[in-house]
Image (cartoon, helix red, strand yellow):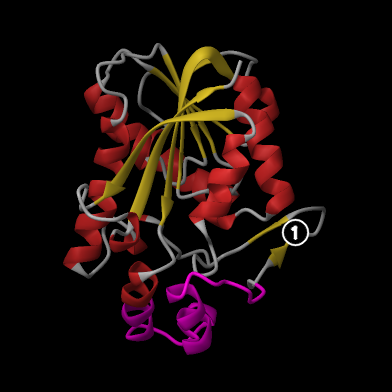
Amino acid sequence: MSQFSYAAITRQDPNPFKRYLQNKRLRDAVGLLGRRRPETIVDYGAGDGELAYVIRRKLPDTRIVGFEPSLLLRAQAEAHIGAMPGVTLTDDAAQIADGSADAIFCLEVFEHLPPEETRTALAHMVRILKDDGVLIVGVPVEIGLAAWVKGRFRSLRRDDFDTDRNHIAQAVRRDIRFERFRVDFDTSGGYYPHHLGFDYRELLKALDGCFELEKRWSSPFLLMPTEWNSELNLLLTKRT
């Protein structure tokens, strides 16, 4: 596990199409800022810090707070962006000040969170985001045609929970009833390590309780239906 590299399985993956998709999803998410120039951005689930790196190149005067609870990923983020001016990393979302963020990015996070952890994350975001701020969410599409394409791709690489033919078939039918493989922490909580079984429609319902959806952006094919794409990006504002 010590050799695990987030970059190696995302933007530096051996497959050129996957590399393209991983890099494009970041550009598309940042593009949802439009002409906004936030003073402070929180990257909720910062991974190895690549999003912060992209944002700093586009918005050099913006302060970025990266929240990453994983010790392994945070170490990679420290190596990648730790020396960049205006960037702070933390492993405790509770330490991020109330109403301090003009924008929050949460990319490739919600698909890993069980219901209770999802509610906790949303509560943090409501607290951290300014009343006139924006929340930008990016999640993988794992139902419909996208589920079939991704299932085939994964099956060529490995034999795991997310390559089970029955599970993939259910996801293609948009009828996810199987129990997702879950990893529990020693103290409390847990996460889903695989994307298969995630349904973005359930996340939209959860978000609707505290945020208003302003814009949807499918990636990489904007004009195609969501389930013909690999990623869904959302621009949201707080309900007041």
**SS state under label 1:** loop
Residue at 19% x, 56% y is: 20
In the displayed structure image, the side of residue 191 where residue 238 appears, left or right: left
Identify the residue under disc 1: 185
Which corner quadrant of the image does residue 95 belong to? top right
User: Residue 208, relative to residue 174: is it above or below?
Assistant: above
Task: Name the quadrant containing residue 182.
Answer: bottom right
- 224 is within the stretch colored magenta: no
Residue 172 vertical placement versus 83 (above, below): below
Q: Nearer the viewer, residue 50 or 214?
A: 214
The answer to whether one can see residue 136 in this image is yes
Image spot of residue 10 (x, y percent): 33, 58
Tell me the magenta residue range.
151-179
The residue drawn where x is 37% and y is 85% is 155
Residue 73, percent across and down? 50, 49
Image point (44%, 67%), residue name: 143
For the C terminus, the image quarter is top right
Place of residue 157 in the rendered image (x, y in percent of width and height, measured from the top left): 35, 83
> Identity of the amino acid at label 1?
Phe
Q: Residue furthest right?
A: 187
Instruction: Tell me if I can see residue 103 in this picture.
Output: no
Above or below, 164 against 101 in this view is below
Membership of 160 in magenta stretch: yes
Please name the residue shown 62% across and 43% down the image: 206
